[in-house]
Image: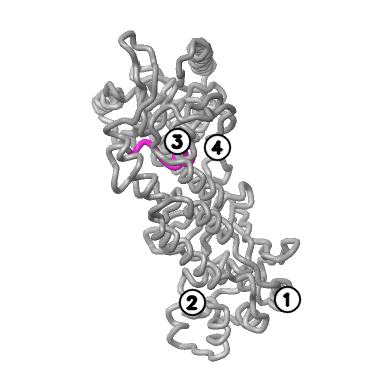
Amino acid sequence: MRVAYSRISTAEQDDHGALETMRRQLEATGADEILLEIGSGKDDSERPQFRKLVEQVKQGLVTEILVPSQDRLYRNLGELMKFVETCRVYRVKVSDLNGRDLTCSTADGTLWTQLLGSLDQHRSGLYGEKTRKALEAARSMGFPARPRIPFGLRKVRDANGRFIAVELDPELSPLARARVDAFLKQGLGLTGVAKWIQRNQPEAYWVQQAQLRRWLVNPMLTGRLCWHKADQLGNFHHVDSEQTFPALVTDAEMEIIKSRVNDRTLTQGVKDQTRRMLSGIARCASCNGVLSHKVNAGRAKYLRCSNTRCRHNTKQVKLDVVFAALQVAFAKQATQVAEALRRPTVDPPGVSVLQAEIKTLETISGTEVLIQQKRTEIAALRGESASSVPLWALEILLSHPYFWVKLSDERLNDALRLVVASVPVQLGEKTADAKVTEVVFRTPGQQRCPVAPGELIPLRFTREQARVAFDDQKLDEALAALGLAA
């Protein structure tokens, strides 16, 4: 498959149709697939289309990559050479539209690729220095100099083209406000809002997951200018104390937004999304990333590493291997784990955040309905909290072999999270090489239970067969006591 790829650095560059121009150029090459996006060439952290391209290369789906010019891949020499080397290993040809091949398989090819890459990196650095000096000069003259303005706002310029103020963008501010409302009022997390944008605002799709968090907490949304980025989380060294232009988000709403994005329990996907087997539990032993689900054409189920920076990216393990390891670990240490988990009742982590949000909302008129929703969420969290575990019920649950088939995938995942911190999976070059050697329990000190390969036993019943063939009153009572009845 021949894939054509290109990018631009900022959304402002697309105002003059830069992406559409690139699309027409790449369509003329006759490529089977065209990937276009907006993102910096310094790295690939905010370039999902490029990461998709890398994954396709590693899966052996790509035979040739076409780019308008070498700097569309990277303006970072080190990252560029890593990518070219990856393409060499997988025998993928990389060419630009000038007819030059990017390669490191020959001395001349390596020289020209490194030389042009160094020039691209140098040019990018010079442009950054020039921009910083121009901004500092403008600020010293009293102008509100900013290199970029967040989505929903726009720059106001005088007759000479100088940036003199900020205002709400009449076209984009309604879209931006709808995104804020989706986060605040619909109970969606960051991933949920990103998916909501894909469905409801495809024409303004460029603000996505990696950018969304920084955009939501940007002080400029409250009508204040800010300078000198402090980190990659959206914090700044200097923020004006006074509002100098119309706000998209109130100060009270910004406090709620910050508390929510900093609480991971409230920002993990769509609120009512169904969890699948072992979601968030099985992890790659190399990068500690959560393994994602994959079902092949034959309906066999796998878990695989999706971290593009991990050496085991796209490597996978059969779900049954992790499944069997958990059964063995529970059978070996059910009583010890249950005893360690018995502890006094405490509020789950999300309650304190919701209580802080209610306190803020009580100072704002017209938020009674939202306050009631928060109180309902608190009641649900307290009602479903697993911080107080009946010991007898947990012992039955952990040691019973048919615990695994009595519950739906979502309920089973809830039950596993009561006791399991993670299941590290050692991935290999082949699926058959993957193995699980231990299970880490959610006990004081993170108790680890070793699992030997010879202890893994095949399941004797499918989940569907066991639901019909087996009915145990004690197990049903234990599930009910833990709030996990099917």
What residue is pinned by disc 2? 407
Secondary structure under badge 3? helix
Disc 2 residue type (three-letter) = Leu
Disc 3 residue type (three-letter) = Thr
Residue 222: give its label: 3
Magenta-highlighted residues: 205-213
Pick the front one: 442 or 305:
442
> In front: mark 1 or mark 4?
4
Q: Earlier in the sequence, mark 1 or mark 4?
A: 4
> In front: mark 2 or mark 3?
3
Q: Is residue 207 visible?
A: yes
Instruction: Tell me if mark 3 has few (under 14), some (14-19) or many (20+) residues whose alpha carbon lies within 10 angstroms of its own.
Output: many
Instruction: Tell me if mark 4 has few (under 14), some (14-19) or many (20+) residues whose alpha carbon lies within 10 angstroms of its own.
Output: some
What residue is pinned by disc 1? 339
> In front: mark 4 or mark 2?
4
For the residues marked 1 and 2, what is the alpha-carbon distance in whole angstroms?
23 Å
Disc 4 residue type (three-letter) = Leu
Secondary structure under badge 2? loop
Q: Earlier in the sequence, mark 1 or mark 2?
A: 1
Secondary structure under badge 1? helix
For the residues marked 2 and 3, what is the alpha-carbon distance in whole angstroms?
47 Å
| Residues marked 1 and 4 touching at CB (< 8 Å) | no
What residue is pinned by disc 4? 233
Q: Earlier in the sequence, mark 3 or mark 4?
A: 3
User: Could you tell me which quadrant the N terminus lies in?
Assistant: top left
Disc 1 residue type (three-letter) = Glu
> Among all residues in the image, which is located at the extreme top?
160
Where residue 456 appears, x then y in whole percent? Answer: 62, 70
Where residue 39 appears, x then y in whole percent? Answer: 42, 30
For the residues marked 4 and 2, what is the alpha-carbon distance in whole angstroms?
39 Å
Magenta run includes residue 410: no
